[in-house]
Image (cartoon, rainbow, N blue to C red):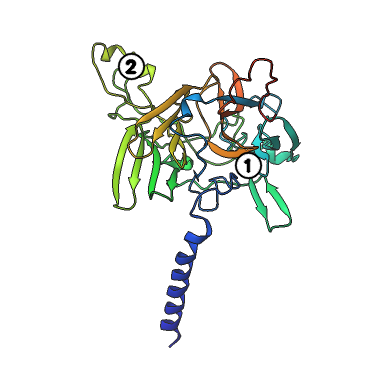
Amino acid sequence: MMRPFRHLFYGLLTLALLWALPSIAQYGAKNGQWRSYGGELGSTRYSALDQINRDNVRDLKIAWAWKSDNFGSREFRSETTPLYVNGVLYFTAGDHRAVVAADAGSGDTLWMYRMDEGERYRQAPRRNSGRGVAYWTDGQDERVDGTKGTIVLPGFGGGANWESGAADPETGFVYVGSNTAPTLAALSKPDPNQPNFVTSDYAMGGGPGIPRVQGLPLLKPPYGRITAYDMNKGEIAWMIPNGDTPPAIKNNPALRGLNIPKTGSGSQAVLLVTKTLLFAGEGGGGQPMFRAYDKKTGETIWETTVPVGPVQSLPMTYMHNGKQYIVFATGNAASQTPAQLVAYWLPPPPPAPGARGGGPGV
């Protein structure tokens, strides 16, 4: 006699949770803050800030850069996404995953904390800076947790992987970066001479790799793409390649004399959506470009070359002292440029003759 009641109870509980979820965290980052990895607890990666819009995005310039050179072994790829809480950026850096607090207006380091992990660090299979921290408050006490992890499904990179996507609660559009990167799964005997040696009979890896045809990928392009889904209609609104055609493809002798459309980079786009624009970097392994797209059509409104390297982390945005900033992590192993955070802003107009100017944070 209890079973029907139990089913009814669980059904009502499920409906209550579904009813409550939209009111909890599905409306984007608020008040110019960025307090969660995805902007807010719904992880929409949406901000209603529109100081930077399609009319002035062409005027974006680098405001400051924070470098990770002195945080452990040199790291050339960083996937950390900062949090912005009340004027301060919090993020991780270096292979010890130090927690760093920096001034949001100037990039100046305010403080750093690093746990001495001892043997755990020496045995760690992934020695990198991670993807960021978590913030908690009950309205009085505040904490920053540097042990936040990420669950990746379906694995082997997947379609969207940890880069996930971005959702616009005002229009009902969802934007997802995905790529075509076939993986050959294989098992091999672990090599005890490798730094990340694991004590097991077999470990993943060691396969012959995916064959290529005359130096070209086996599968047809686009190799990476950005797709906009109209959730109001359950339809794909548009799909564009993730960037231009990479030089290795464009300059391949087998394609000489052919006019091929953009193939996109074989990387997963990292996205940020605001009230007026969709911002995208090509992701790790892509070209060093940062772009602003029209949210309705996918048209490129603005693009710039990032002087350091490709955009490797999920971009975030915040409002500080009346100015909107967009921040992401970048680095470049080819040029031996260690990972750093780069902030873009709309610089103030030049001062009138005889007046004194100011920079970020002034």
Residue picked out by circle 2: 250
How far apart are the alpha carbons under marks 2 and 1? Answer: 40 Å
Query: At which x and y percent is residue 206?
Result: 45, 31
Q: At 43% across and 47% down in the image, what residue appears? A: 168
Mark 2 or mark 1: which comes first in sequence? Answer: 1
Query: At which x and y percent is residue 102?
Result: 70, 35
Query: Relative to residue 228, is residue 136 drawn left or right?
Result: right
Q: Identify residue type, mark 1.
A: Tyr
Query: Relative to residue 339, is residue 45 drawn left or right?
Result: left
Q: Are marks 2 and 1 in contact (CB under 8 Å)?
A: no
* Camera sees residue 82: no
Q: Is residue 175 above or below residue 59?
A: below
Q: Is residue 299 above or below residue 306?
A: below
Q: Identify residue type, mark 2.
A: Lys
Q: Residue furthest front?
A: 353
- Asked where in the image residue 325 lies, by quadrant, the reply is top right
Tag 2's secondary structure? helix
Q: Is residue 229 above or below residue 293?
A: below
Q: At 46% across and 42% down in the image, what residue appears? A: 275
Quadrant position of the N terminus in the picture: bottom left
